């Protein structure tokens, strides 16, 4: 596909996404607005993983932990807005303007701390050590009995945005999520084409050579991992709002596996890999679960077929991107 | 805290650790020899437990159920290895994660389709339902003692097989350097198919023996799979001895941590906090140990590679 065709496709996709709720409401398909919301939130989470995995070669098997930390940040702040301040110092809030950046910051800091240790390992060891840290965070959330422990924590309502936007309305929430997803993709596209982006792709391709030319490889990987974590935190904040609920399940290793599967199915090394993967996986789930309670069987079979037939993911079927 | 309680929890830990070893032994060889991440290993454990429950239900004999489950799961393992897994060896780790993750979905739903939504009951044999007096004030479940004995017996057999037979020598050669073993004329692919079958059979044994203690249900493989990965990372990928030490370490730390950490923490923190944090801390400590091993000794405590 040429660069021009790619750009037209992207613009067409954004226009279709903008028009979708209007059409859906017109034909009384409001349910699907909620479904597409979920797809876009997971697309954002998968895209954040793709930044680390696809562009920098950091195969994290614990990415759901950062999504979960973001989700818990929003939920805990909302809880304290209702019942007294956190540690008696930090007042709670339900404002999206404070809670969502706080979620990104918390996840980013957690990713930086974990990354400082994990990034000293490579290959299979990196996969396993990120899994280990994600499991620690999972059991940490299970132990948070004040915030529901195993049972999770309900949000009384979605975050407040002001400016006439009411997130309780699924259509309003839809446009907020869409705007954030588009902004994230745009910024990530810019990032990947920048000097920083070329450096991390170089590190993915040949770390030793990049080190030899004088790039501070560890610092590049570290920053990339922290950015990916922060972006996952925003996806987590949206997920908490979407479900009005968070539980340790959001951090379970199968969720990390799901995000990995989304990226690999959609196509690592492609800017839109995360979006394609999330849409494919959740779309298949939606279609088959309407059909049979045993939907996991055909979905699993299709995924298995994709491993053998499309090794570069769905995006790979459209040819290589110039900057991948 | 009495001595008998400590002994009882230590035995529980040993029993769980030995079952973990049955899972980890196969997994570590797959990982070590073929450099393959197999997430579907937990599915074999689940399939084994379901087969055991079904056959035991039909025949009325627990041990016939266990034996049939091991044999059938070993055959399933051989078939799986020869068809679906073999093309994956040459692919990168992430493709293996994707493919075997998909296999988990297929296996979970396949089990639901074949065996139904309800968890089948799996009861230990009536003769073992009681408790045995091990000391003045210590009575311990007879069934768990048998599980420990079977686990220890299998571990000893594995040790003899791997360390004192020609086949075992081939296995160790394959784990330490596959290319060299191939060059010396060892048919590593065929050897590996057999090994995978044995590993699958051991998974089924673990699933069948743990069935009466834990529950036989869909998804039972996922939680134990990750623990098995912890075990082989701690022990050293490809090392059966490492898997044994790692498994018992993880089993004892997990079980005793859950039992004793809340009480130990009560000495320092208020009761409610200790009750909440204790069990989580036990789980976290295992993963912290795994992270520490990966950080300071990535080859594991008992590395297979020279």
Image: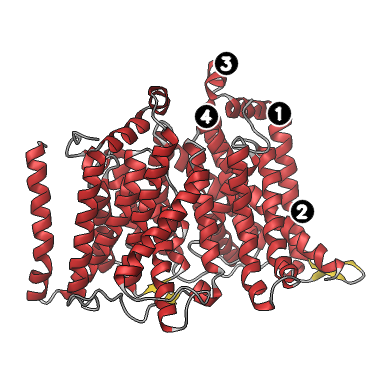
Measuring from the top left, give residue A55's x and y in whole percent: 32, 39
Mark 4: give few (<14), some (14-19) or many (20+) Cα within 10 Å: few
Q: Which mark is residue B149?
A: 2
Q: Quadrant of the C terminus of chain A?
A: top left
Q: Residue at x 27, y 35 (%)?
A: A195
Q: Residues within 10 Å of mark 3 (few under 14, many from 20)?
A: few
Asked which quadrant contains residue A107, the reply is: bottom left
The quadrant of the rendering that contains the N terminus of chain A is: top left
Q: Residue at x 30, y 42 (%)?
A: A268
Q: Mark 3 vs mark 2: which is more N-terminal?
A: 2
- Mark 4 on the same chain as mark 1: yes
* Residue holding disc 1: B165
In the image: residue A200, left or right of residue A252: left
What residue is disc 4 on? Answer: B190
SS at badge 1:
loop
Q: Quadrant of residue B94?
A: top left
Q: Chain of mark 3?
A: B
Q: What chain does badge 1 belong to? A: B
Q: Quick one: label 1 or label 2, which is nearer the N terminus? A: 2
Between marks 2 and 4, how big is the CA–CA gap? 31 Å
Disc 1 from disc 2: Cα separation: 23 Å
Q: Is B114 drawn above or below residue B36 in the view shown?
A: below
Badge 1 or badge 3: first in the primary sequence? 1
Q: Secondary structure at mark 4?
A: helix
Residue B79 is labelled as: none
Residue receiving disc 3 = B184
- Who's the residue at 71% across and 28% down the image? B165
Q: Is A209 left or right of B166, judged from the image as shown?
A: left
Q: Marks 3/4: CA distance?
A: 15 Å
């Amino acid at each position: 596909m040429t660069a021009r065709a790619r750009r037209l496709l992207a613009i067409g996709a954004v226009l279709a996404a903008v028009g979708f709720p209007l059409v859906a409401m017109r034909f009384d398909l409001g349910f699907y607005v909620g479904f597409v919301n979920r797809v876009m939130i997971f697309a954002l989470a998968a895209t954040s993983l793709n930044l680390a995995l696809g562009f920098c070669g950091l195969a994290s098997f614990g990415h759901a932990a950062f999504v979960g930390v973001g989700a818990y940040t929003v939920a805990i702040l909302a809880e304290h807005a209702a019942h007294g301040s956190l540690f008696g110092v930090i007042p709670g809030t339900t404002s999206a303007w404070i809670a969502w950046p706080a979620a990104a910051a918390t996840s980013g800091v957690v990713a930086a701390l974990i990354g400082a240790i994990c990034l000293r390992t490579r290959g299979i060891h990196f996969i396993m050590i990120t899994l280990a840290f994600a499991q620690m965070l999972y059991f940490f959330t299970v132990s948070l009995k004040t915030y529901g422990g195993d049972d999770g924590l309900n949000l009384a309502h979605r975050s407040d945005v002001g400016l006439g936007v009411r997130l309780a309305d699924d259509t309003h929430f839809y446009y907020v999520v869409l705007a954030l997803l588009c902004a994230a993709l745009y910024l990530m596209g810019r990032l990947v084409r920048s000097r920083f982006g070329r450096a991390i792709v170089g590190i993915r391709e040949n770390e030793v050579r990049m080190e030899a030319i004088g790039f501070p490889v560890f610092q590049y990987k570290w920053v990339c991992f922290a950015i990916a974590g922060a972006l996952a935190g925003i996806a987590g904040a949206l997920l908490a709002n979407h479900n009005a609920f968070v539980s340790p399940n959001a951090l379970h290793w199968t969720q990390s596996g799901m995000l990995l599967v989304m990226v690999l199915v959609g196509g690592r090394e492609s800017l839109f890999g995360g979006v394609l993967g999330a849409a494919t996986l959740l779309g298949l789930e939606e279609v088959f679960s309407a059909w049979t309670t045993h939907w996991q069987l055909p979905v699993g079979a299709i995924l298995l077929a994709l491993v053998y037939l499309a090794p570069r993911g769905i995006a790979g079927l459209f040819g290589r991107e110039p900057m991948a | 805290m009495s001595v008998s309680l400590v002994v009882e929890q230590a035995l529980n830990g040993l029993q769980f650790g030995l079952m973990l070893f049955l899972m980890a032994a196969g997994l570590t060889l797959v990982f070590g020899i073929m450099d393959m991440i197999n997430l579907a290993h937990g599915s074999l454990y689940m399939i084994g437990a379901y087969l055991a429950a079904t056959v035991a239900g039909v025949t009325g004999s627990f041990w016939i159920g266990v034996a049939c489950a091991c044999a059938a799961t070993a055959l399933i393992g051989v078939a799986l290895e020869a068809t679906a897994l073999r093309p994956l060896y040459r692919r990168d780790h992430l493709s293996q994660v994707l493919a075997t993750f998909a296999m988990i979905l297929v296996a979970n739903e396949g089990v639901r389709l074949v065996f139904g939504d309800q968890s089948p009951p799996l009861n230990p044999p009536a003769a073992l339902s009681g408790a045995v007096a091990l000391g003045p004030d210590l009575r311990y479940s007879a069934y768990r003692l048998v599980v420990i004995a079977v686990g220890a017996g299998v571990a000893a057999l594995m040790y003899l097989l791997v360390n004192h037979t020609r086949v075992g020598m081939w296995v160790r050669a394959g784990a330490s350097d596959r290319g060299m073993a191939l060059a010396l004329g060892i048919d590593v692919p065929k050897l590996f198919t057999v090994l995978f079958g044995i590993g699958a059979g051991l998974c089924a044994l673990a699933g069948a023996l743990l069935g009466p203690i834990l529950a036989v249900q869909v998804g039972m493989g996922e939680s134990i799979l990750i623990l098995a990965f912890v075990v082989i990372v701690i022990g050293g990928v490809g090392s059966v001895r490492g898997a044994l030490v790692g498994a018992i370490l993880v089993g004892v730390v997990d079980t005793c941590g859950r039992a004793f950490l809340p009480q130990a923490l009560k000495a320092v923190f208020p009761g409610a906090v200790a009750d909440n944090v204790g069990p989580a801390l036990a789980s976290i400590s295992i993963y912290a140990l795994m992270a520490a091993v990966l950080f300071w000794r990535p080859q594991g405590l008992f590395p297979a590679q020279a």
